[in-house]
Image (spheres, rainbow, N blue to C red):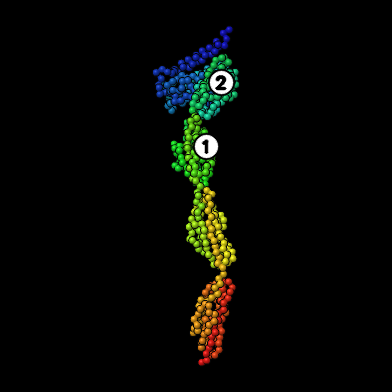
């Protein structure tokens, strides 16, 4: 028996005969006698919306094409042809049309398609496409090939065996899913037998290196086709720069720049921690602050005066580090435990205030029951305590008249040193002054000159009345009797009516000192006979 190979050979001979007859019928084709203007502008073979590549690629001057290895499951294709000159006619297998569905034969067969483009006269040109369907026993093609991550370049075509894929440096494996066109075929991925449509995970070489994925499809007749995917893994980045760098409280001595690696920060002596926050330019870089892998950290500072170096290290994905230095200078805590100002109301400090003088005396009147004290710290960060607290103001009640009270104000500097200021407030005892400082009558005068210690006076007056004015030696004394004046009123005055001629009128004035002791003054007025 001649067997299957003979049958296949006869089929190809028949196809060639049909092609030859077609060329003869249409008087074709590549001869110089054909009008070169009569030609196609485009020629496409499509399965659904997908183009099937012509061999060779379409060129208006080329008239013979093949489409080989069509899938055995493909029942037909669509041929679309457009003339180069509007008005020229197109026939596809003798049917006047620019697009026609062409049914395909069984596996291993070739279907010829003749496309004739003709002008209105007699000039024409014939294009021939041979559509060859894969023999079931020789189908060593993939129907589809998908990868993840990334995408194939170019997009998958069953007839194209070579592809590239570019992935990031962080991708260390590739998932490949190949699907056979002939379920009876077999395949391997990088030498490992693989089931059609099942994803395979392939480890990739180190960043910066390529990995070749090889997919070998073996048809039932043992013919093979190899598909290769070149996976290009990007090299690890070398960016070890910082994007930003800040500290709190305070700030860097110079504006941050990725290229500048050394900075200085000065902080007050009261600052015992500093927060450092940084971010790398490459999100995949590693970063440490003060030896700890973080992007923000609070660093404790020793008591000042002190200097602390903080290192921020950025390590690029390729492993190359870069170190930024921050030197934090902490000042010593202030030793200022002075007052800047000290005052008391009512009253005046003796001696006048000086920051270096810690002790003062103030004398207030006997009627003052409290004093207001205001103290201002020289260092705002110092702390006041004692009778005046940190607000700096206090109202101090006094003890009874004739007593003393000590007001103490302690100033604690930020470094803990203290200084105490004291004010001794002396409240005067009640006055014993119950004297008059003057005594005047009008009209007339005292027969003897006025003296505070002279209590009795006489006046001779012929007037019907007498005006008496008396002034206390102590304004806070109380004057009563014929002439009155209360506390705080220094002078009293009264007009006294006198009796008739030859009569006497007695005028009395009592002065009571603040301590309660009284002194009586008297004036005897004699009215003479006319």
Q: Residue 57 has which mark?
A: none
Name the spot of residue 3 as percent of width and height, x first.
57, 9
- Discs 1/2, front: 1
Classify 296 as above or below 152.
Answer: below
Q: Are marks 1 and 2 in contact (CB under 8 Å)?
A: no
The residue positioned 57% from the left and 14% from the top of the image is 221
What residue occupies the far top of the structure in this picture? 1
Classify 523 as above or below 26.
Answer: below
Q: Nearer the viewer, residue 72 or 368?
A: 368
- CA distance for labels 1 and 2: 49 Å
**Residue beneath disc 2:** 189
Could you say which quadrant of the image residue 483 lies in? bottom right
What is the number of callouts on the image?
Answer: 2
Residue 43 visible in the snapshot: yes
Name the spot of residue 505 as percent of width and height, x first.
56, 86
Name the spot of residue 149 as percent of width and height, x first.
54, 28
* Few, some or many residues within 10 Å of mark 1 (<14, 14–19, 20+): some
Residue 267 visible in the snapshot: no
* Few, some or many residues within 10 Å of mark 2 (<14, 14–19, 20+): many
User: Element at badge 1?
Assistant: loop
On the rendered image, what quadrant is the N terminus found in? top right
The residue positioned 54% from the left and 90% from the top of the image is 501
Q: Which label's residue is closer to the chain start, 1 or 2?
A: 2
The residue positioned 53% from the left and 55% from the top of the image is 420
Q: Nearer the viewer, residue 170 or 440?
A: 440
The residue positioned 54% from the left and 15% from the top of the image is 223
User: Element at badge 2?
Assistant: strand
Could you say which quadrant of the image residue 33 lies in? top left
Q: Residue 290 has which mark?
A: 1
Name the spot of residue 14 as percent of width and height, x first.
52, 13
């Amino acid at each position: 028996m001649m067997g299957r190979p003979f049958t296949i050979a006869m089929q190809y001979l028949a196809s060639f005969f049909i092609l030859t007859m077609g060329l003869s019928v249409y008087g074709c084709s590549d001869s110089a006698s054909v009008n070169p203007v009569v030609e196609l502008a485009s020629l496409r073979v499509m399965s659904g919306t997908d183009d099937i590549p012509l061999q060779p690629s379409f060129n208006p001057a080329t008239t013979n094409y093949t489409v080989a290895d069509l899938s055995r499951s493909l029942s037909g294709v669509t041929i679309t042809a457009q003339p180069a000159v509007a008005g020229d006619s197109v026939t596809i297998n003798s049917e006047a049309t620019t697009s026609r569905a062409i049914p395909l034969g069984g596996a291993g067969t070739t279907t010829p398609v003749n496309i004739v483009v003709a002008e209105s006269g007699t000039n024409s040109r014939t294009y021939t496409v041979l559509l060859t369907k894969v023999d079931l026993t020789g189908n060593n093609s993939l129907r589809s090939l998908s990868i993840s991550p990334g995408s194939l370049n170019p997009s998958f075509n069953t007839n194209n065996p070579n592809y590239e894929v570019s992935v990031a440096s962080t991708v260390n494996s590739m998932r490949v899913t190949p699907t056979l066109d002939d379920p009876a075929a077999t395949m391997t991925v990088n030498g490992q037998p693989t089931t059609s449509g099942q994803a395979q995970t392939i480890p990739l070489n180190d960043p910066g290196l390529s990995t070749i994925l090889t997919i070998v499809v073996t048809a039932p007749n043992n013919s093979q086709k190899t598909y290769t995917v070149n996976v290009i893994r990007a090299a690890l980045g070398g960016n070890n720069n910082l994007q930003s760098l800040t500290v709190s409280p305070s700030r860097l001595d110079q504006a941050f720049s990725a290229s500048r690696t050394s900075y200085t920060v000065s902080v007050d002596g009261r600052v015992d921690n500093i927060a450092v926050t940084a971010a790398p330019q490459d999100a995949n870089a590693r970063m440490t602050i003060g030896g700890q892998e973080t992007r923000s950290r609070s660093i404790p500072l020793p008591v000042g005066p002190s200097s602390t170096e903080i290192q921020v290290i950025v390590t690029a994905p390729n492993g190359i580090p870069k170190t930024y230095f921050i030197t934090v200078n902490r000042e010593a805590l202030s030793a200022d435990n002075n007052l800047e100002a000290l005052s008391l109301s009512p009253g005046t400090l003796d001696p006048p205030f000086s920051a270096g003088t810690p002790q003062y005396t103030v004398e207030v009147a006997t009627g003052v029951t409290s004093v207001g004290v205001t103290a201002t710290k020289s260092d705002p960060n110092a702390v006041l305590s004692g009778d005046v607290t940190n607000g700096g103001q206090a109202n101090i009640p006094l003890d009874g008249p004739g007593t003393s009270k000590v007001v103490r104000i302690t100033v604690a500097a930020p470094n803990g040193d203290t200084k105490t200021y004291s004010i001794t407030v002396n409240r005067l005892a009640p006055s014993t002054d119950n004297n008059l400082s003057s005594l005047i009558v009008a009209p007339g005068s005292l027969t003897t000159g006025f003296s505070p210690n002279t209590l009795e006076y006489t006046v001779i007056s012929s007037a019907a009345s007498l005006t008496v004015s008396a002034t206390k030696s102590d304004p806070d004394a109380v004057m009563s009797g014929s002439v009155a004046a209360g506390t705080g009123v220094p002078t009293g005055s009264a007009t006294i009516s006198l009796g008739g001629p030859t009569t006497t009128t007695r005028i009395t004035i009592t002065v009571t000192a603040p301590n309660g002791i009284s002194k009586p003054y008297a004036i005897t007025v004699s009215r003479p006979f006319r």
